[in-house]
Amino acid sequence: MKKKKDENTEVKILDAAKNIFQSKGMDGARMQEIADRAGINKAMLHYYYRSKQLLFEAVFTNAFSLLAPQLNAILNDDSSIEEKIKKFTSNYITFMMKHPYLPNFIIQELNRNEDFILKMKNNTGFPNLEKFKKQVYEEVKKDIITSISGEQLFINTLSLCVFPFVGRPLIKALINTDEVTFNQIIEARKIEVANFIINSIKK
Amino acid sequence: MKKKKDENTEVKILDAAKNIFQSKGMDGARMQEIADRAGINKAMLHYYYRSKQLLFEAVFTNAFSLLAPQLNAILNDDSSIEEKIKKFTSNYITFMMKHPYLPNFIIQELNRNEDFILKMKNNTGFPNLEKFKKQVYEEVKKDIITSISGEQLFINTLSLCVFPFVGRPLIKALINTDEVTFNQIIEARKIEVANFIINSIKK
DNA sequence: ATACGGTTTAACCATTTGGTTAACAAATAC
DNA sequence: GTATTTGTTAACCAAATGGTTAAACCGTAT
């Protein structure tokens, strides 16, 4: 089987690249460091991925397509807004606790190169908010929840879930707490965030 | 007056460095680009600030001390929690609309080098949450607001204010909107966020 | 006028960095 | 078995980059 070796190497490279890019960013990452981490010669990086830019894009796309379906699945299921909020916050916070590097990586790199998101948008599976927005509109009309736009509710929910991960060092310093306690606070948010939101919008 | 010239240059450098560092980050910034932007010779950067690292730290400290007092002022004044939330969200969002680069810069660089925050903590004027926490505790006890910890309420408030600026490109893509509309949404949040929070915690 | 201090510049330097090459190794095909 | 393709490496390269230096500049005091 001739594929054995190169598949291994290709995966090893991607894993190493993931690790380095996600902790140091595109600009901070060094090709040599990626090669070292993968335990192979630097030339192999170019053999499999041609350039730093392309290797980076592979990592980024990979990371993004890990995050996007999570959003989509919940936004488009058939439960009520309240149910959706509960599922979303709990799932998303759990997910990010497993991949704490991810949100920051994606946000950081999207800020560095805004055009990047366009490539993602063209991918199938890019999250679509239409159903959620319509649903919010309906529930507001039926007086189930207070008057709020789908966009604002979505931004609020996303902010409450993601920001503690992105702003971790800042928040940790501001509330003057250590790593362990901070993780407990995050853990508590799996439920707290949903309650906070629902408390706010439920009539 | 011999100070005239160098003060000008020093300030010109800091301004240019601010601009470059805040849009490209420490790793992405180039000393030559900073010099070009300041309209001076690259050697001057080292004459006034010795190294890239020190120049960066000057910019960072500068940026941070622009943000910190904002927090402190509101957290330590004598109004009720509800008043504080209102002031805080409105002030903070207004502030960030004026400096849209700032939150991302600070968060990005704190993630790159977590030790950095320690230096900031030693500065006088680093925000202190004690009063706010005590106040939340009291208002919960008096049944003015629902049961919530000061930390969680603070994290929620900060998240709702800051995240839309940090995650701007991502959110813009997700809610599928253009720059102008997005700015309107942000503008609306000056009031929306406070209402959202107060709705949630007020009994 | 001249000597002196800080300021500014062009040229230079060592190192790092992304990327290439040419030769070697190891499968696979014939 | 041998030719051929694929995978891997060490050595190399040019460009970029942070930083230095030595000389020039310029306002001021003597």
Image (cartoon, coloured by chain):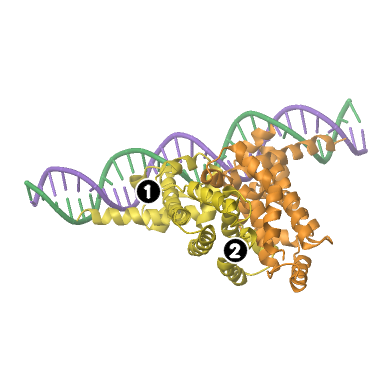
Chain colours: A orange, B yellow, C purple, D green
* Quadrant position of the N terminus of chain A in the picture: top right
Q: Nearer the viewer, residue A93 or C26?
A: A93
Q: What separation in Å lies between label 2 and label 1 (alpha carbons)?
A: 42 Å
- In the rendered view of the protein, which quadrant contains the C terminus of chain A? bottom right
Looking at this rendering, what residue extends furthest in the front direction?
A: B142
Q: Nearer the viewer, residue C8 or C14?
A: C8
* Residue A99 tag number: none
Q: Is disc 2 surrounded by few (<14), some (14 to 19) or many (20+) residues within 10 Å? A: many
Residue matched to label 2:
B193
- Chain ID at mark 1: B
Query: Residue C24, image x and y in percent?
Result: 72, 28
Q: Residue B133 at what x, y percent from top left?
A: 53, 48
Crowding at mark 1 (Cα within 10 Å: few <14, some 14-19, many 20+) = many
Where residue A28 appears, x then y in whole percent? 57, 44
Relative placement, left or right, of C14 versus B143 is left
Dot 2: element: helix
| Residue toward you, B94 or A67 | B94
**Mark 1, secondary structure of its residue:** helix
Give the residue drawn at x 43%, y 54%.
Answer: B69
Q: Is residue B103 left or right of residue A95?
A: left
Q: Position of residue B187 (x, y in %)?
A: 56, 69
Quarter holding residue D25:
bottom left
Q: Chain of mark 2?
A: B
Q: Give the residue displayed 73% in from the left and 46% down from the top.
A: A95
Q: What residue is pinned by disc 1? A: B45
Q: Kindly identify the amino acid type of the residue bearing the numbered disc 2.
A: Val
Q: Is residue C26 left or right of residue A37?
A: right
